[in-house]
Image: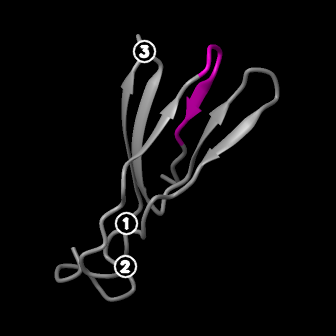
């Protein structure tokens, strides 16, 4: 990505794997933040686990596991 893009261009990424039966979420985020909502008014950020893609060579976001609680919703946001 670094070799094929202008110097000031980067890409954020949020990749998730969800097991709805077990309530297990594993995600990796390259500079892209999403959120867990509820139950109630609770908001938990799913923080980035790495740098945006195309900023530094060899940077790979790490995986972060979470256990979802009943009533929680994942909010994926974008700037498109």
Q: Quadrant of residue 77?
A: top right
Whether residue 75 is in magenta: the answer is: yes
Quadrant of residue 75 within the rendered picture: top right
Q: Which colour scheme is used?
A: one colour
Percent from the top left, x then y, of residue 23? 47, 19
Q: How many labels, in total?
A: 3
Mark 3 and mark 2 in contact? Answer it, CB < 8 Å. no
| Label 1 close to label 2 by CB (< 8 Å) | yes
Q: Distance between the residues labelled 3 and 2?
A: 38 Å
Q: Badge 1 local density, few (<14 within 10 Å), some, or many (20+)?
A: few
Indicate which disc, 3 or 2, sits on the residue closer to the N terminus. Answer: 2
Residue farthest toward the right in the current orientation of the protein: 41
Which span is picked out in magenta?
A: 69-76
Q: Residue at x 62, y 14 (%)?
A: 70
CA–CA distance in space, label 1 to label 2: 7 Å
Element at label 2: loop
Q: Which mark is residue 11?
A: 1
Q: In this view, does 9 lie above or below 42?
A: below
Please name the residue that numbered disc 3 is placed on: 22
Name the magenta segment's main secondary structure: loop
Disc 3 from disc 1: Cα separation = 31 Å
Label 2 Cα crowd, 10 Å radius (few <14 / some 14-19 / many 20+): few
Q: For mark 3, give the secondary structure.
A: loop
The quadrant of the picture occupied by the N terminus is bottom left
Q: Name the residue under label 2.
A: 9
Viewer-side residue, 1 vs 51: 51
């Amino acid at each position: 990505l670094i070799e094929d893009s202008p110097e000031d261009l980067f890409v954020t990424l949020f990749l998730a794997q969800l097991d709805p039966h077990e309530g297990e979420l594993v995600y990796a985020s390259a500079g892209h933040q999403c959120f867990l909502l509820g139950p109630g008014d609770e908001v938990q950020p799913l923080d980035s686990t790495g740098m945006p893609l195309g900023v530094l060579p060899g940077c790979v976001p790490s995986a972060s596991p979470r256990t979802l609680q009943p009533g929680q919703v994942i909010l994926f946001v974008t700037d498109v």
